[in-house]
Image (spheres, rainbow, N blue to C red):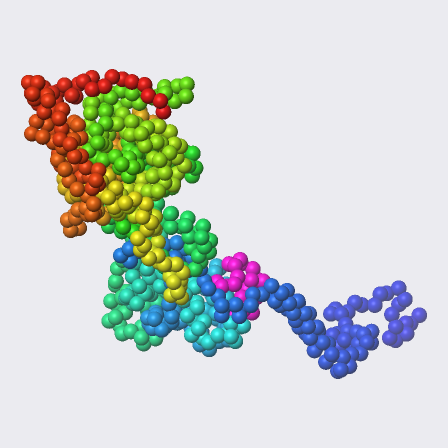
């Protein structure tokens, strides 16, 4: 059967297409299945989706800005902003001795800054500063690309205005929110302040490292100069520090600092501000920095007294924020002499007496707790103007960093015999005279049910002697007898009147210095004697001036209250001169100190404290030597051997340039030549005599009959003199008296 033309057998599959349907046929097939989109639909799709995305992002932006704006600081506060400034402390000659600061800064106006430095800052830090409105998007984009290329942050995009906003109002937290706030504040600042105002604020606020805020503080910190005194290479080095003060620190990384400095030098050249010769010279300049260490703190204990006074009266804000100028009474030259005299003597004692614990053993140790105070030998010294009370020098210890405890002001120690002048002052002011004779002989004093048996430091007795000799030789038994006559209560009264402020108990041993006082109290009280009976108070501050030039506090010299008569003051002072000229402090003369002076040594039981307190007609000085914990300095240690050498070295140095002076003798004082064994007017037969001062009307009128009769009996003066001094046995037996 013939097959029909054009047909295949039913069992034969149709041949497969080699390449499948054509693309046109597929499009036609798809077009039949998909809905047809109009041109308007395509337009909606093309515009609506981006609009939606933009709207979504804008919404997020609005929310973020709203959140950022909620706690955004008000830039208006800059109009009344007073940055924390450095408080400067000066001595009496206007020499800077210390600075208090949290952030060391010294703001100066823009027109006082070197023009080239300002130009360099703007060129390198923010070239578009005078063209942008607070934020520079081109700079941000450029910094972004550079950071991406470097794989790390090598450049910031913040403008000077943004940096000011961050420094003034924000933290240095690295977050998007902080950057948004920074930009918002920068825009507001640009609206409120002129460009030069913003630049001035920035240059006075930016941190340069090592505690220096602002260009002036940086100049002083790194070069010990004012900004106006810097050379081009010096202020370019400073300008380069703002990017990263620690990274470019010239102390830590001098090579980095040099490279950064040279960039600013080149910027000035490229701007046409300097020529090639100048540029090459500045690039070749060596970096010469001020010493890294702070200026020596030569009067730390004095400064601490200033700080405590200010904080107590005005609060810490005045010290650390207000930037006041404090003009003090300190004489820096005297302070340096005091520091040296004290340390020299203590090192000598440590060496010669082989003390077990030396300061050198502690030189690398710092103490955080006063209970762990150093155990080596300590000392204190305080010097005052006798007429005004101005504190001229003060040493509170050997090392402030190891122990800030001020032994000149805060330490209360037994003064020993240096307290005896109060007994003698009370006696002289109540009818006794320097020529009165008292016995240096044993005595027992009944106090209630007990007996008090005072003794002399050398366990010897020298019989009858004048009060002048008793004080000069520091005879305890003379002082005890005198205290009993006058009354301990009266002695306490005079001590308070003259300047002692510590609590005192009116006991019979008070004349031996068994109470506790501070060195500054002793110096104050002895000023009263030197100042003809006028008491002065210790003064540390002469004037305080605010940052605006207003006087906050000012002190004027005052005469003080008259608490002793000039006559009593003169007589006691004259007696105390004998301590130095012929008594327990004669070593002061052997050390070359020849000026007119008066004073008193003091030594406590077991040789634990050594004192010397003395004065010239101009200044008084108290010196104490001992350990913080009561212990023997060394066997035989005394005020004359420990403290007096410090006093002598100090006073000799600080009085060399002063004209000679004497203690003025007031009216009503007369002189008489007396026998020092009887206190009567001397005759040629008296073995010992001297010219003595008396208050008119209290001078002796009878001639000594004792030695005249002795001569008639055939005894020689020398034999009688030796008899007189024999343990007082020729005059008095040991007796018991009631207190």
Residue 588 x/y as whole percent: 18, 37
Quadrant housing the C terminus = top left
The part of the image, by quadrant, that contains residue 35 is bottom right
By secondary structure, the bulk of the magenta-drawn segment is best described as helix
Which residue in the rendered view is the most extreme toward the front?
702
Name which residue lies at 6% across and 18% down: 714
Q: Nearer the viewer, residue 701 or 103?
A: 701
Residue 101 in sight: yes
Residue 59 x/y as whole percent: 68, 70
Name which residue lies at 31% across and 29% down: 485
Quadrant housing the N terminus = bottom right
How many labels were placed on the picture? 0
Residue 163 x/y as whole percent: 47, 65
The part of the image, by quadrant, that contains residue 240 is bottom left
Position of 568 relative to 175 (above/below): above
Q: Nearer the viewer, residue 634 or 460?
A: 460
Residue 632 in sight: no
Residue span colored magenta: 166-186
């Amino acid at each position: 059967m013939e097959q029909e033309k054009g047909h295949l057998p039913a069992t034969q599959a149709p041949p497969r297409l080699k390449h499948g349907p054509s693309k046109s046929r597929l499009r036609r097939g798809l077009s039949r299945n998909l809905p047809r989109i109009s041109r308007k639909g395509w337009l909606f799709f093309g515009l609506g989706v981006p609009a939606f995305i933009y709207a979504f992002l804008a919404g997020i932006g609005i929310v973020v800005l709203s959140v950022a704006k909620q706690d955004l600081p008000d830039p208006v506060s800059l109009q009344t902003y007073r940055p924390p400034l450095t408080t400067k402390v000066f001595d009496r000659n206007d020499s800077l001795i210390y600075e208090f600061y949290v952030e060391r800064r010294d703001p100066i106006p823009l027109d006082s800054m070197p023009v080239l430095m300002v130009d360099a800052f703007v060129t390198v830090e923010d070239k578009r500063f005078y063209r942008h409105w607070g934020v520079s998007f081109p700079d941000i984009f450029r910094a972004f690309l550079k950071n991406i290329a470097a794989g790390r942050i090598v450049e910031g995009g913040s403008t000077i205005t943004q940096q000011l906003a961050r420094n003034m109002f924000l933290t240095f937290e690295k977050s998007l929110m902080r950057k948004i706030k920074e930009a918002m504040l920068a825009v507001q600042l640009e609206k409120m302040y002129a460009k030069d105002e913003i630049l001035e604020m920035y240059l006075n606020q930016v941190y340069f490292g090592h505690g220096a805020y602002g260009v002036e503080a940086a100049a002083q910190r790194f070069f010990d100069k004012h900004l106006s005194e810097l050379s081009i290479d010096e202020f370019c080095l400073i300008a380069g520090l703002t990017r990263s003060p620690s990274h470019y620190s010239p102390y830590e990384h001098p090579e980095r600092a040099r490279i950064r400095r040279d960039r600013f030098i080149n910027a000035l050249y490229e701007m046409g501000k300097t020529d090639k010769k100048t540029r090459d010279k500045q690039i070749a300049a060596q970096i010469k920095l001020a010493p890294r260490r702070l200026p020596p703190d030569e009067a730390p204990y004095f400064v601490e007294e200033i700080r405590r006074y200010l904080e107590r009266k005005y609060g810490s804000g005045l010290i650390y924020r207000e930037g006041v100028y404090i003009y003090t009474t300190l004489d820096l030259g005297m302070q340096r002499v005091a520091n040296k005299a004290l340390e020299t003597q203590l090192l000598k004692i440590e060496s010669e007496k082989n003390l077990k614990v030396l300061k050198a053993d502690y030189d690398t140790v710092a103490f955080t707790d006063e209970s762990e105070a150093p155990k080596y030998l300590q000392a204190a010294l305080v010097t005052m103007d006798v007429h005004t009370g101005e504190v001229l020098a003060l040493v509170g210890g050997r090392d402030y960093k190891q122990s800030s405890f001020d032994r000149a002001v805060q330490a209360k120690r037994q003064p020993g015999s240096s307290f005896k002048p109060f007994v003698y002052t009370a006696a002289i002011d109540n009818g006794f005279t320097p020529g009165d004779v008292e016995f240096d002989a044993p005595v027992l004093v009944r106090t209630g049910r007990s007996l008090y048996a005072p003794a002399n430091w050398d366990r010897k007795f020298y019989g009858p002697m004048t009060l002048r000799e008793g004080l000069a030789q520091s005879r305890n038994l003379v002082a005890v007898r005198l205290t009993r006559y006058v009354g301990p209560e009266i002695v306490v009264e005079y001590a308070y009147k003259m300047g002692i402020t510590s609590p005192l108990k009116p006991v019979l041993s008070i004349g031996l210095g068994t109470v506790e006082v501070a060195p500054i109290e002793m110096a104050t009280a002895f000023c009263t004697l030197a100042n003809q009976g006028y008491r002065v108070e210790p003064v540390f501050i002469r004037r305080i001036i605010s940052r605006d030039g207003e006087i906050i506090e000012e002190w004027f010299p005052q005469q003080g209250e008259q608490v002793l008569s000039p006559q009593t003051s003169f007589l006691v002072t004259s007696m105390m001169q004998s301590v130095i000229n012929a008594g327990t402090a004669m070593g002061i003369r052997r050390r070359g100190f020849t000026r007119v002076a008066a004073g008193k040594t003091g030594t406590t039981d077991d040789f634990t404290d050594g004192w010397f307190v003395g004065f010239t007609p101009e200044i008084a000085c108290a010196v104490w030597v001992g350990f913080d914990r009561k212990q023997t300095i060394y066997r035989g240690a005394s005020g004359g051997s420990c403290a007096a050498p410090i006093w002598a070295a100090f006073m000799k140095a600080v009085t060399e340039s002063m004209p000679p002076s004497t203690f003025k003798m007031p009216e009503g004082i007369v002189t008489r030549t007396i026998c020092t064994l009887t206190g009567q007017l001397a005759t040629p037969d008296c073995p010992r005599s001297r010219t003595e001062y008396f208050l008119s009307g209290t001078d002796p009128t009878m001639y000594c009959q004792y030695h005249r009769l002795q001569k008639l009996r055939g005894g020689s003066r020398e034999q009688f003199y030796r008899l007189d001094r024999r343990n007082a046995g020729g005059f008095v037996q040991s007796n018991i008296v009631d207190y």
